[in-house]
Image (spheres, coloured by chain):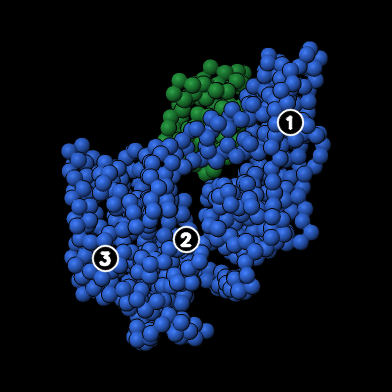
Chain colours: A green, B blue
């Protein structure tokens, strides 16, 4: 299992557009991937669940990855949160 | 009627009214496992058809889809296929023995309520997406396979409760020349799509909009947010003229963005914008605005169920300060009362609301609310050149009282060790005739004046702006109004107090020369009007403007003044 913290750097937070990109990214991996904020954990396959957490710019979230391809999933998520998200 | 103009342009056309058919619960209880399995299958098929439908729109649109539209469709696809929604619906069908129709309706309604209750504008707007995908799936549960592309035989203006994202995209927009919706805001889908496609749109028109019938003649002004129903030929002619002007201008004016606003004989005129939120900042700079001459703060107080806290307000002002790139931003303290009410702040009905408990009068009474706002502005003032402006000032006592509370606010911030701009500039709106007449007295108290011509005109001429029977009397070119304006500008010059104008007159091309001639230093207007006024300034001289001003001030009636000014602009 890999657990990583990220700070959201996106003016409007993790809103619908980046959430769509994130869900599509996660779909490409076999591992079970979930997102944690303020004690709540949701699977990263549901737009509804991600939106319900209202993740704002500057907030910290934790991503938990568990499965065969967890290492490569973690690399992809690093790229997403540290680079792609700011460009979305 | 009046709404919020969200996509500029003028359209004159026949109405096409879209009325929603209300989905209803059937109340049917499923009898056995077979029925349950059938309903689950029915739901899954509907999801599949809905998903395919959106994919189809994405790939086979008759018109080129804009990036914003593709984004919206992608979000919808994710929501349609959302595993959480599917789990919840299937669970409801299985355990509560409800039909697919009823289960989905309840789940969607539940999510919509949660989103609306989130006290977050963005999330409230997303509830429209949820409703939209819900309606789409529901339609396929009850009537599988029926395609719904709206076609029009001739040009129309769409009148609707609200327009869902997928509706805007499945619409044959080639014939859509305008949108007007009952609800919505600047960030509604209808607004985003209308702007992306360059179609004039007005949202938030209120219940009255739905009294419009198919084929009624509609005039829609997407800039000022005006919707006129079955207007007379005079109005139609007037708007046709404005529409032509608008078309020509948008083409030539786009090129003026970076041209300095200076007359040919070297007089610089500041052109700034009137805005309501940080989202408006982009437009200010796109149109070459030199800053914000009026930030209305009412939006911050609306669409919620309690007063915003100092922290919430601070964030709002800070975002604007940050996005202003060091350009001046005049923040007007809250102007409620009159015709503007807050659902959570109960103001008893008054016989003369415009002469009643409103704006600074409320603030000086409810100093707690006032101080919270002032503290938030003072704190945000370190992130940009914010200035504070008090509305509805009638005399010197109100200014002194307001300044006293401002000093108290500063004192509290200092005690709390909260950083703030102690040197913040303050000014007042000149919109009450007594203030205009005593501008020489008031000038000594403040750093700047901003003339609010809408109220000044209404109070000077004793004309209720809302009363349709007397609109012909509402006339900013009345010599009485012009003399008051002249006095304010003149006294400002003598006492070295900066004078701006933020009322509708500042955006009226007919008034530009007279106002430059009077010596007005700053014109503030809706951002899209800036290029029009700039175009006049860069093609005029200050010397000529002064001559125009002296001629106008000697004329005896607004008819003569208007005729004279129209001749000049032709």
Q: Are marks 1 and 2 in contact (CB under 8 Å)?
A: no
As displayed, is residue B108 above or below residue B424?
Answer: above
Residue name at image x 68 percent, y 16 percent:
B96
In the foreground, B63 or B429: B429
State which mark lies toward you, 1 or 2: 2
Q: Are marks 2 and 3 in contact (CB under 8 Å)?
A: no
Q: Earlier in the sequence, mark 1 or mark 2?
A: 1
State the residue position of label 2. B466
Q: Secondary structure at mark 3?
A: helix
Give how far across and how far down residue B163 sits, in percent: 64, 47
Q: Residues within 10 Å of mark 3 (few under 14, many from 20)?
A: many
State which quarter of the image contains the N terminus of chain B.
bottom right
Give how far across and how far down residue B497 sits, in percent: 24, 68
How far apart are the alpha carbons under marks 2 and 3? 23 Å
Number of labels in the image equals 3
State the residue position of label 1. B47
Residue name at image x 70 percent, y 28 percent:
B25
Q: Quadrant of residue B285?
A: bottom left
Residue name at image x 39 percent, y 53 percent:
B351
Q: Secondary structure at mark 2?
A: loop
B464 left or right, relative to B234: left
């Amino acid at each position: 299992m890999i657990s990583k913290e990220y700070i959201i750097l996106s003016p409007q937070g993790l809103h619908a557009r980046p959430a769509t990109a994130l869900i599509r990214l996660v779909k490409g991996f076999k591992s079970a991937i979930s997102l944690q904020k303020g004690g709540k954990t949701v699977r990263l396959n549901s737009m509804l669940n991600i939106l319900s957490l209202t993740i704002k710019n500057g907030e910290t979230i934790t991503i938990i990855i568990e499965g065969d391809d967890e290492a490569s999933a973690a690399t992809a998520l690093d790229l997403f949160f540290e680079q792609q998200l700011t460009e979305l | 009627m009046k709404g919020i103009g969200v996509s500029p342009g003028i359209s004159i056309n026949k109405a096409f009214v879209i009325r929603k058919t209300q989905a209803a619960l059937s109340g049917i209880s499923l009898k056995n496992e077979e029925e349950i399995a059938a309903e689950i299958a029915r739901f899954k098929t509907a999801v599949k058809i809905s998903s395919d439908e959106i994919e189809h729109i994405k790939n086979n649109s008759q018109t080129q889809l804009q990036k914003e539209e593709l984004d919206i469709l992608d979000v919808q696809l994710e929501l349609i296929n959302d595993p959480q929604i599917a789990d919840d619906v299937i669970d409801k069908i299985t355990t509560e023995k409800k039909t697919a129709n009823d289960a989905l309706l309840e789940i969607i309604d539940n999510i919509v309520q949660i989103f609306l209750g989130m006290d977050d504008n963005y999330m409230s707007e997303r509830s429209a997406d949820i409703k939209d995908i819900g309606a789409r799936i529901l339609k396929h549960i009850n009537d599988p396979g029926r395609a719904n592309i709206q076609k029009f035989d001739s040009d129309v203006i769409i009148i609707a409760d609200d327009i869902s994202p997928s509706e805007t995209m499945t619409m044959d927009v080639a014939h859509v020349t305008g949108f007007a919706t009952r609800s919505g805001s600047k960030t509604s889908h209808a607004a985003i799509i209308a702007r992306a496609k360059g179609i004039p749109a007005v949202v938030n028109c209120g219940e009255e909009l739905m009294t419009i019938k198919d084929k009624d003649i509609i005039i829609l002004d997407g800039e000022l947010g005006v919707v006129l129903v079955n207007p007379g030929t005079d109005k139609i002619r007037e708007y046709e003229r404005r529409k032509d002007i608008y078309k020509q201008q948008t083409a030539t004016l786009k090129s003026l963005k970076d041209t300095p606003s200076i007359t040919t004989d070297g007089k610089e005129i500041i052109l700034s914008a009137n805005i309501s939120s940080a989202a408006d900042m982009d437009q200010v700079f796109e149109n070459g605005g030199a800053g914000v001459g009026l930030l209305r703060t009412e939006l911050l107080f609306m669409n919620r169920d309690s007063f915003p806290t100092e922290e919430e307000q601070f964030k709002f002002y800070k975002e604007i300060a940050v996005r202003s790139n060091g350009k001046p931003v005049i923040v007007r303290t809250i102007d409620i009362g009159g015709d503007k009410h807050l659902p959570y702040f109960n103001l008893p009905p008054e016989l003369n609301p415009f002469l009643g408990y409103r704006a600074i009068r409320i603030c000086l009474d409810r100093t707690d609310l006032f101080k919270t706002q002032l503290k938030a502005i003072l704190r945000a003032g370190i992130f940009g050149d914010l200035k504070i402006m008090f509305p509805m000032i009638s005399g010197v006592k109100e200014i002194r009282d307001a300044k006293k509370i401002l000093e108290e606010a500063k004192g509290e911030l200092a005690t709390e060790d909260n950083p703030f701009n102690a040197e913040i500039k303050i000014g007042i709106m000149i919109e009450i005739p007594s203030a205009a007449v005593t501008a020489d007295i008031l000038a000594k108290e403040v750093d700047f004046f901003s003339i609010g011509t809408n109220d000044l005109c209404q109070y000077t001429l004793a004309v209720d702006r809302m009363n349709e029977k007397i609109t012909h009397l509402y006339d900013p070119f009345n010599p009485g109004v012009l003399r008051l304006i002249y006095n304010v500008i003149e006294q400002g010059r003598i006492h070295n107090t900066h004078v701006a104008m933020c009322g509708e007159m500042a955006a009226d091309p007919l008034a530009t020369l007279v106002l430059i001639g009077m010596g007005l230093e700053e014109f503030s207007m809706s951002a899209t009007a800036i290029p029009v006024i700039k175009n006049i300034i860069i093609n005029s001289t200050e010397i000529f403007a002064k001559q125009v001003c002296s001629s106008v001030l000697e004329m005896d009636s607004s008819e003569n003044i208007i005729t004279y000014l129209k001749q000049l602009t032709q």
